[in-house]
Amino acid sequence: MAATLPGIPPMKPAASLPALFFSLLALIGASNSAIARQDPAPVRTEISRFLNIQTRSLPGEVNIKVGDFPIDNQLPPCLQLEAFLPPGARAWGRITVGIRCLAPSAWSAYVPAEVRVKGLYLITAAPLSAGQILGPDDVRREAGELTAQAPDVLTDPTQAVGHAAKTSLAAGRPLTASHLRLPPAVVQGQPVKVIYRGPGFQVANDGTALSSAGDGQGAQVRLANGQVVRGVARNGGFVEIILP
């Protein structure tokens, strides 16, 4: 036992070198882990840029809100980010946007976002009966949030005037394509062009319509190679598919 001098408290033994070594490694590891996390700011910037491109052609005033990307993520920092929409999704209302890293490490994540559009849409100016052919006085425009309406809400009188109502509608009802008997943009069995559109590119392919659909309605097409795809029918006999 070590001797102590009177009046002098015994000294505590120094921490062992192995314990100090492992504590130092733990601190370095924690520091490196924090440094290695993906900064949320570039992620949100890329998603905002992507959604601005996707919404350029939308009618009305567009407001985009990008949700939070976790600051405590465990993803390695990325030098080349790319945003995308999941298959079948569109930049409209509450959505989830994908973000992928192209370099130096491959990873992907998803971030909530919201696209709100304020503009003019059609409502019935008076009660409509089933089969009634709409005239200019049967509809009027109203300002509001388009993203709060049905996806096929009509925005221009030319989309409604001259078409027949499928069912009876009360006055003041937002008017949608599904309320009207629209002339088909594509007819079942008709040869059609399938137009793939994406940021900065457009590709066309040939196919055959598997269903009839009016302008703005969904349509299935069988391509020459047998693949079946789904897009949006457009006047002029083509089907549009928007790619991320």
Image (cartoon, rainbow, N blue to C red):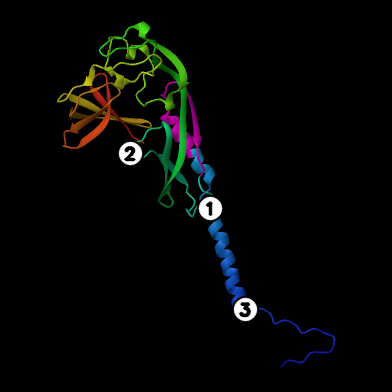
Asked whether residue 55 is drawn in magenta, I would say yes
Which residue type does callout 2 highlight? Pro
Q: Nearer the viewer, mark 2 or mark 3?
A: 2
Residue for badge 1: 72
Answer with left or right where residue 43 lies relative to residue 126: right
Q: State yes or no: discs 1 and 2 in contact (Cβ < 8 Å).
A: no
Categorize mark 3 by other alpha carbons within 10 Å: few (<14), some (14-19), many (20+).
Answer: few
Give the image location of residue 76, x and y in percent. Answer: 48, 53
Image quarter for residue 2? bottom right
Q: Secondary structure at mark 3?
A: helix
**Relative to 8, does residue 239 appear above or below in the rendering?**
above
Give the image location of residue 119, x and y in percent. Answer: 46, 20
- Residue, x 36% and y 40% (percent of image)? 86
Residue for badge 3: 17
Cα separation, mark 1 vs mark 2, equals: 28 Å
Cα separation, mark 2 vs mark 3, equals: 57 Å
- Residue, x 41% and y 15% (percent of image)? 172
- Residue, x 58% and y 64% (percent of image)? 28
Q: Please name whichever residue, 63 or 31, is drawn nearer the observer in this view of the structure.
A: 63
Which residue type does callout 3 highlight? Leu
**Relative to 176, does residue 202 appear above or below in the rendering?**
below
Which residue type does callout 1 highlight? Asp
| Bounds of the magenta segment | 46-68
Answer with left or right where residue 156 lies relative to residue 33: left
Residue for badge 2: 87
Q: Earlier in the sequence, mark 2 or mark 3?
A: 3
